[in-house]
Every structure is written in C-alpha cells, then in structure tokens.
Image: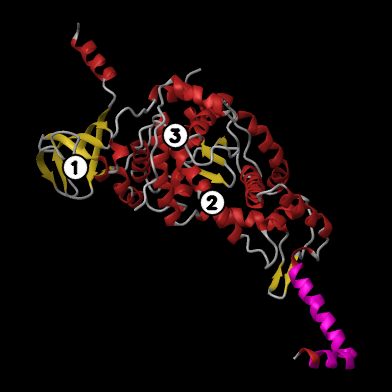
Amino acid sequence: MFPSLRLKFGKSYLLKLILLLAIFSIGQVVFAGFSIGGIDVKGVFDAVSKTKDLGDKSETEEQLIGEEVSTILLAKSKVLENDRVQRYVNRVGRWVAENTERPELPWHFIVLNDASFNAYAAPGGYVFITSGTLLHLDNEAELASILAHEMAHVLRKHYLESIKSKAKVGLAVDVGKLVYGSRSGNSGNSVFTSQFGSFAMTPEDQMISAVDNLYSKGLDRDDEYEADAMAMVITARAGYDPFAFLTVLQKIEGSRPDAKEWEVFLNSHPPASGRIDALEPVSEQPFAEQEGYQLLEDRYSHHLFDE
Amino acid sequence: MSRFSVLLIFFLLFPSLSYGEKRANVVRDAGLMSQPSSSATQIMSLTKNSQVQILERKGGWYRVSTDSGEEGWLKLIVVRYEAVGTTRSSPGVLSRLAGSTGTTGIRGMDEEQAMEARGGKANLSQLKRFAASPEEASTFARDRYLIQRKVEYYVP
C-alpha cells in the first residue's frame, strides 16, 4: 500500500498539491475557532498553555467559566446595597460550604436587589439569591437550605456542563478559549468557521446567549431532584433542620402561579409538588429524625430587619 | 402568674413553631397519629383532599386539627398549603432591606447592559469583600450551637 502511494506522489505534483491543501484545510478546521475575524491566535494559545501550567485544567476552566457567567449575570441585575445582609448571607453560606465535599472552592454569595423569588449559581462557587427570596423566608435554616441546594448544583457541575453544551462551540474549540475570546473584547463579526458551519456570533455574544438560555429555561428535572436530595443532607450536616428545605418547597408550591414575583422561578423549575414527593424517601432517613437541629428564626430577622 | 405569661413562656420554651391560622390540604390518604411518629397509634385516617389547620411543626410532622375537631400529628410531606398571598414582600420592606428609599432609575437594557458586562467584572471583584473566612463561619456557627454532623448523601 505505502510503496504505491510513494510512487504516486513522486510522479504527480498535482497530487502533492492536493495533499498539501487537504492538510491545510484540516488544519483550518482544527484551528477554526480563532483563525478568522481578527482574534489573536497566539494569544489564545498562550492562555491555554498558562491554564494547563496551573495544574488541574478542569478546575481552572470551571473558575474561568464561572467568573464569566457571573459577570454576565451581574450585568442584568442590581446588587442589594446592604453590607449587613451581604455579610450575613455570606457567613451562613460559608458555614454551609464547610459541610460540603468542596469547602476549598472560593464560595461567594451575592444578594441581588430583586423583588422576585429566585436563586441560582454559577460554576466555581458563585451563589446568587434575591432579596425577594429573603422576604419569603422565616428563618436561617430555610436560607441555609436554599444555599445548600444551589451549592449542590455547583458540586455536581450541573450549570457548568449545561453552559458548555449550550455554548455550542465548534469541534476543537473548548469553552476556555471562548471565554478568553470574549474577555479580550475581540469584535470580529464572523468568528467561528469550520466545515460544519458558520457561527456569526462573537464569542461574547455566544456566552451571553448561552447564559440567557440556561438561566431562563433552568436545569433539567433530574438535576433539580438531585440537588434537592443533597440540599436536605447538607443542611442537616450544618446543624440546621433539614425539613426547612421542605417548608421552602411548600411555600413555593402554595404560591399564586399568576403572581409576577414567581414567574421567572416557576418557568425555570419543575413543579414544587413533584419535588416534595421526590424527597419523601430522603425525609425518612434516620438523619431526618435526629434531635437538636436549629431554625434560628431570631438571628435571621435580626440581620435582615433590625437596625 | 397570669395565664398570658404562662402561655408566652410555653411557646418560648418549645422548639416548635406555632402557626396561628394556617389552612392546608392533604394530598393523599394519611394517618393522623397520636404522636409525631409512624409507630404511634393512629387516631384516624385522613382521606385525600381533607382540609386541616396547622398548629405546630416538630421535625417532619405537623400537629393539626381537622374540620371535625380531631387533633393529631400528620407527616409534613403529605401537606400542601392553600395558595395564599405573601405578607412580607411589600415594596416598603424591600426598600428597607435595600437600605435606601429611592432605588436607581429603570435601567435601559441596551447600551447600559453592554457597558455593565464589561464593568461586571469590576463589580464581581468588589463583591468578593463580603466573603466570610472558614474561621468566621465556624464562630458564627458556634455562637448559636449549630452542631456539625456526619450524614451521607441519600442514594436511592
């Protein structure tokens, strides 16, 4: 087989040329993501190699994506200007984090100035909760349980995997490069080209679109059920009443479906009644029957409402 | 001691919550128990869609009273609330939470948003100042007797 190939190429310049072109186009496909549209190819490779040098690439990619997603989410929101509440939520959150399998993550908790009920997270440990949510809760255990649920999504990388698949990048371009392209403010129009199609969006737009889509549609039902089961356990580990998570779900279930403050949340989560039913086996585990759990109603209202 | 102060002390001592007038439904046939335990004696069986009044909660159980005047314990998991409006979420409380009376004006969603996306990174680093250290978190927990315990994740 090979001797005959060598003979062929030796004889025909045209064939050599075609072979060279084929290799070149394959190269184009492989490096398609950033060869057109003014993106600094060398810069991207530098970013990737620096990322690799830092050791566990998958963890650093998670942080990179998490920061980018958080930045995009913050662009659409107002942060609650109340240091006391921010610090309180961060202390509750950090305590809950100490009771997860990744306490070393740089967990950050951000309270948004938003009347609607909602909470979500970004990869790498950014947890967002609205002031509207805080107004619906009765005690610190309920707050801890919501934070625990969001942290479970981070622990299981639900948001991370979903963003990566929604960003729909070309074959050989991973999201780290996408984020790098987005950050360096490159404004080429037609950026991604490969033999599989043309994506006429800048990396920045692609990320924004993926974030928009994910956070309005929400995660899938299995992810939510998994995070619910984990939330009850994490809440209990931290010394809070695990049933506080169920009372939160009961509040959601009993809310007026037409009320504006519930709209975004109800559109992005599976029905609360099903979530409650799914937690029945968890609620019957021995840990749920233990004594000595806390609710801390007074500490909650003290930090939120007292001067 | 007046009856009122006795009642007050009663409620302060008990680690359960009193609910006032909270009406709820039962989503499936369930037993009304004499104690908050599945192994207690059953007082009666409540049928699906029965209405109850919630009196207090203890762990995964509600003490309830039925329309026929029976009282007993029901599993939290079978209870759903009637849809009610919320009490605390008035704009007044929200702005008090925000610590300022006037909020900034309605933002335009276009150029401002694009600018914010670039400035968003600066905001994110500012917000990091609220983060608590593990030591602060431990102290915070200890202050109110939040006791850590080992629990495994539930695997079906």
Answer above or below: position of A258 versus B62: below
Mark in the foreground, 3 or 1: 3
Looking at the rendering, in which quadrant would you find the N terminus of chain B? Answer: top left
The residue to which callout 3 is attached is A143
Q: Residues within 10 Å of mark 2 (few under 14, many from 20)?
A: some
Residue B80 spot, x, y in % from top left: 28, 44
Residue A209 seen: yes
Q: Chain of mark 2?
A: A
Mark in the foreground, 2 or 3: 2
Question: Which labelled disc corresponds to residue B51?
Answer: 1
Q: Chain of mark 1?
A: B
Amino acid type, callout 2:
Lys
Marks 3 and 1 belong to one chain? no
Q: Chain of mark 3?
A: A
The residue to which callout 2 is attached is A157
Q: Residues within 10 Å of mark 1 (few under 14, many from 20)?
A: many
Left or right, residue B118 beside residue B4: right
